[in-house]
């Protein structure tokens, strides 16, 4: 029995050493041409809003994705939303407007299931028509905003069309890898 336990321990130790030596995933590059090209496609389509995921990778225990968002000039160009498990980090490339975070989503509708928005973009959450309460801030080119999972957010006014890069951190791995 001692030989078996010793053999088991040796195999277990060898496995743990192999795991510790597993190389990290390679870095992923996304060029500005890829990001701007995706934004140009949204604008060319004539859509008032757009959210295009470019890449979602396994970052070793959680998924991380990069995409682009577009919001046309106007009042309430898109609805409000929150994401149950996905944190978003916005960096504005162009434009300016009023971003509201926190508060309560007006006319909340649950997003679940296998829709492209849930499985391919931002995971399950809530969509609505606006936000009541919350913190209002003016954002413009170069600004970065971190929106933790579960935080309602909404561009209530877009002064100049907004183009932004979004990084999505998905610890629950709810969004499909691409």
Image: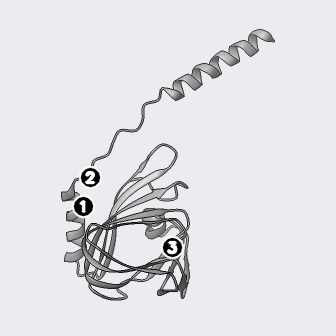
Instruction: Tell me the tag on residue 135.
Output: none
- How far apart are the two marked residues, 3 and 1, measured between alpha carbons? 24 Å
In the rendered view, does 81 fall on the left or right side of 138? right
User: Which residue bears the numbered disc 3?
Assistant: 82
In percent of the image, x 47 and y 87: which residue is there?
130
Image height check: is 151 above or below 169? below
Please state if 3 lies on the left or on the right of 125 as rendered: right
Nearest to N terminus: mark 2 or mark 3: 2
* Residue at screen point 55% across, 69% down: 150
Looking at the picture, how far across and down is residue 36, in whole percent? 21, 64
Q: Position of residue 127 (x, y in %)?
A: 50, 79
Q: Which residue is mark 2?
A: 30
Labels 2 and 1 touching (C-beta < 8 A): yes
Q: CA distance from mark 2 to mark 3?
A: 26 Å
Dot 2, crowdedness within 10 Å: few (<14), some or many (≥20)? Answer: few
Please identify the residue farthest to the bottom as the structure is shown.
75
Task: Mark 3 and mark 1 in contact? Answer it, CB < 8 Å.
Answer: no
> Quick check: 49 left or right of 148?
left
Q: Quadrant of residue 116?
A: bottom left
Return the x and y of residue 67 as percentages of the image width and height.
33, 62
In the image, farthest residue toward the right? 1
- Could you tell which of marks 3 and 1 lies nearer the N-terminus? 1
Callout 3 crowding tier (Cα within 10 Å): few <14, some 14–19, many ≥20: many
Give residue 74's quadrant in the image: bottom left
Residue farthest to the top, as pictured: 3
Determine which residue is flagged by label 1.
35
Please, is residue 105 above or below residue 86 in the view? below
């Amino acid at each position: 029995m001692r030989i078996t336990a010793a053999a088991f321990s040796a195999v277990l130790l060898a496995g743990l050493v192999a795991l510790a030596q597993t190389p990290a995933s390679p870095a992923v590059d996304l060029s500005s041409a890829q990001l701007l090209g995706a934004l140009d496609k949204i604008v060319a389509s004539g859509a008032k809003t757009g959210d295009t995921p470019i890449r979602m990778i396994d970052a070793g225990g959680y998924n991380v994705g990069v995409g682009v968002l577009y919001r046309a000039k106007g009042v309430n160009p898109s609805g409000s939303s929150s994401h149950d498990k996905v944190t978003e980090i916005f960096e504005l490339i162009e434009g300016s407007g009023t971003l509201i975070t926190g508060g309560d989503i007006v006319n909340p509708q649950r997003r679940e299931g296998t829709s492209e928005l849930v499985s391919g973009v931002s995971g399950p959450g809530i969509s609505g028509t606006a936000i009541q309460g919350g913190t209002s801030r003016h954002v413009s080119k170069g600004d970065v905003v971190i929106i933790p999972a579960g935080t309602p957010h909404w561009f209530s006014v877009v002064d100049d069309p907004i183009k932004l890069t979004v990084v999505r951190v998905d610890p629950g791995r709810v969004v499909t890898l691409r």
